[in-house]
């Protein structure tokens, strides 16, 4: 297993094609705009070597028996699923942002299950190929970016119906030694600092979309693979010092790219699906289940930091003992722990698939993620409420450091006497980063937008069973157990009951 | 306990993963190291090579796997204890 430092060093061996702000980026690790994201991912490596955290940060490979970083593990039990979300929360607490490595982790697990199922139906050899690839990832402790979301063009059209056929990644050529693919994937978290890219389809597909049913892995510096690093709200603040960006060490959200496959060659040993369109939907669903499981872990870890920051700013402002502040902080904790309950629940309710790998309960995983599209907005609102207006109006670090006016800022932005003004400004900036910046839309759309979860909840929520329960409760359908309790048919029971009652009444009237 | 006994003492420490601890788990280790400063320490989950295996859990869930062998050598902490109580608990396991 690599340490955090070794991971950063390992990135130097790759020469990916990356653009940002009109520039070609030649060295990922030397680019200050990428560096915070790299540090966040490095935490996934570093904590695996700390005895205080290794119990959840590491696992034993079921293939080799070796100790591995949990991010390269295939879940072998319910305990593994639970440890996964424990690890997510821990890393959220340690970085206060997205540490990116879960996407590839989920892709590995989803492909492990799906390649097994494809082989079972078609007699193909994807699963064995995938196991060989998995061994390579585990042995070298690689970070993989999970590439699912296609750019999609006109959302009302299927891939083959698009005016431009490249709006979903697809096979453009099959050769003796492999395939050539073209297309683009959007919002690729952690791409610039990953070693590998694992590509999966983005939706269920039909026979006419056979060429879009493709899954494979390539190194991040594969020929023809281009990453365009995305802008974020306030992103260039990280070039202005250490205070204004709020989280100078680890950044905010994952650092996403537009990933373009400009006729990329993939050798057959790295192809895990090639035309089996009837498994595209399954792969998407399993991946989404794993990924939606995460959000009540990682985002709750980040919320732990935000709640702490909010409590600190209340102290710095001198209002920590006000009952309404305590009430709001309690509400923030309630919201965060509710999401945590969801992640634990979907993990504990997980099950074993035919491949032997475990998967969380899909209904509960989708509930987890749907809550994450709402609750972070509320806990962020409460943080903004408690913090006060300076969370968005504090002067810049450069003005604070300016010898001409710095002392005036020091004097007039003082809160309680015993806390340095700089601490107060730092805490405001951290809250701004966590409660106002890119974290919120990331909670909304990461792992799928709310409607995607609602579709899954509707499909799996068993509405017919609920309708039947209501019919039984309303006396429209027979209630088997009620009839056993009263020893007769429901209608008969009530007829007898009312007959007796009416008789008593008429006797009294007489 | 004599000084030489303390010197030859081997203390194993195993932490849970620490996802959401209800107290600072490190204070338990600090308390132990303070009382047994010359003991040999190793981070392990095995009881066989140590005189006492200290398992430090962050909460009552105690999700970490507890070894089943040599259970008499194990001291489990799942909440904050004052240093004096930590010391007493270790001494209980060591029967000193």
Image: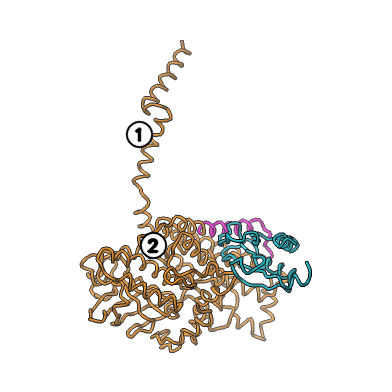
Chain colours: A orange, B cyan
Please state if A109 lies on the left or on the right of A332 as rendered. Answer: left
Q: Quadrant of the C terminus of chain B?
A: bottom right
Residue A263 falls in image quadrant = bottom left
- Mark 2, residue position: A356
From the top left corner, tell me how far across and down residue B17 is, in percent: 56, 66
Question: Residue at position x 64%, y 81% from top?
Answer: A400
- Mark 1, residue position: A478
Name the residue furthest top.
A510
Q: Nearer the viewer, residue A325 or A283?
A: A283
> Does residue A123 appear in this view?
yes
Under circle 1, the secondary element is: loop
> Does residue A317 appear in this view?
no
Q: Which residues fall within the magenta stretch?
A: A317-339
**Which secondary structure is most common in the magenta stretch?**
helix
Question: Residue at position x 67%, y 58% from top?
Answer: A322
Look at the picture and state if A67 lies above or below B69.
Answer: below
Q: Quadrant of the N terminus of chain B?
A: bottom right
- Asked if the stretch drawn in magenta spans residue A398, the answer is no
């Amino acid at each position: 297993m690599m340490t955090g430092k070794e991971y950063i060093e390992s990135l130097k061996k790759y020469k990916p094609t990356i653009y940002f702000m009109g520039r070609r980026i030649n060295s990922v690790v030397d680019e200050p705009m990428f560096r915070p994201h790299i540090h966040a991912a490095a935490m996934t490596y570093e904590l695996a070597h700390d005895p205080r955290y290794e119990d959840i940060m590491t696992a034993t490979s079921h293939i080799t028996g070796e100790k591995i970083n949990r991010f390269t593990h295939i879940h072998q039990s319910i305990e593994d699923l639970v440890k996964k979300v424990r690890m997510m929360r821990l890393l959220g607490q340690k970085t206060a942002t997205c540490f990116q490595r879960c996407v590839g982790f989920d892709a590995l697990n989803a492909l492990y299950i799906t390649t097994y199922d494809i082989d079972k139906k078609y007699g193909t050899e994807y699963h064995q190929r995938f196991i060989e690839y998995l061994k390579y990832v585990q042995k070298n402790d690689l970070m993989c970016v999970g590439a699912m979301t296609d750019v999609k063009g006109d959302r009302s059209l299927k891939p083959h119906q698009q005016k431009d056929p490249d709006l979903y990644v697809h096979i453009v050529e099959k050769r003796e030694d492999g395939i050539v693919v073209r297309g683009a994937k959007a919002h690729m978290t952690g791409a610039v600092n990953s070693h590998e890219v694992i590509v999966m389809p983005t939706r269920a597909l039909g026979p006419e979309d056979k060429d879009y049913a493709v899954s494979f892995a390539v190194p991040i510096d594969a020929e023809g693979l281009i990453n365009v690093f995305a802008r974020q709200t306030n992103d260039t603040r990280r070039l202005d010092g250490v205070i204004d960006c709020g989280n100078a060490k680890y950044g905010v959200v994952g650092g996403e790219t537009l990933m373009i496959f400009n006729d990329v060659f993939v050798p057959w040993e790295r192809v895990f699906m090639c035309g089996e369109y009837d498994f595209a939907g399954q792969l998407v669903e399993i991946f989404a289940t794993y990924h939606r499981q995460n959000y009540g872990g990682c985002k709750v870890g980040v919320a732990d930091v935000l709640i702490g920051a909010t409590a600190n700013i209340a102290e710095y402002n001198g209002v920590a003992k006000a009952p309404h502040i305590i009430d709001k902080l309690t509400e923030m904790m309630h919201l965060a722990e509710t999401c945590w309950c969801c992640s634990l629940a979907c993990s504990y309710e997980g099950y074993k698939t035919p491949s032997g790998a475990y998967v969380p309960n899909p209904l509960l995983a989708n509930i987890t993620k749907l809550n994450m599209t709402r609750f972070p907005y509320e806990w962020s609102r409460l943080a903004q409420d408690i913090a006060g207006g300076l969370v968005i109006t504090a002067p810049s670090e450069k003005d604070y450091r300016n010898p001409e006016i710095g002392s005036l800022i020091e004097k007039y932005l003082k809160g309680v006497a015993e806390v340095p003004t700089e601490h107060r400004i730092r805490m405001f900036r951290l809250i701004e980063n966590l409660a106002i910046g890119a974290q919120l839309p990331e909670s909304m759309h990461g792992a799928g937008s709310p409607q995607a979860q609602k579709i899954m909840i509707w499909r799996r929520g068993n509405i017919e069973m609920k309708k039947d329960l209501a019919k039984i409760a309303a006396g429209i359908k027979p209630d088997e157990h009620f009839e056993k309790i009263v020893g007769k048919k429901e209608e008969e029971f009530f007829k007898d009951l009312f007959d007796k009652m009416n008789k008593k009444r008429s006797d009294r009237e007489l | 306990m004599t000084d030489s006994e303390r010197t030859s003492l081997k203390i194993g420490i195993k932490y849970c993963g620490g996802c959401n601890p209800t107290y600072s788990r490190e204070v338990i280790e600090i308390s132990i190291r303070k009382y047994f400063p010359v003991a040999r320490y190793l981070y392990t989950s095995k009881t066989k090579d140590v005189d006492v295996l200290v398992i430090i859990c962050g909460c009552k869930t105690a999700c970490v796997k507890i070894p089943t062998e040599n259970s008499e050598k194990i001291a489990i902490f799942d909440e904050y204890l004052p240093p004096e109580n930590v010391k007493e608990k270790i001494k209980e396991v060591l029967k000193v």
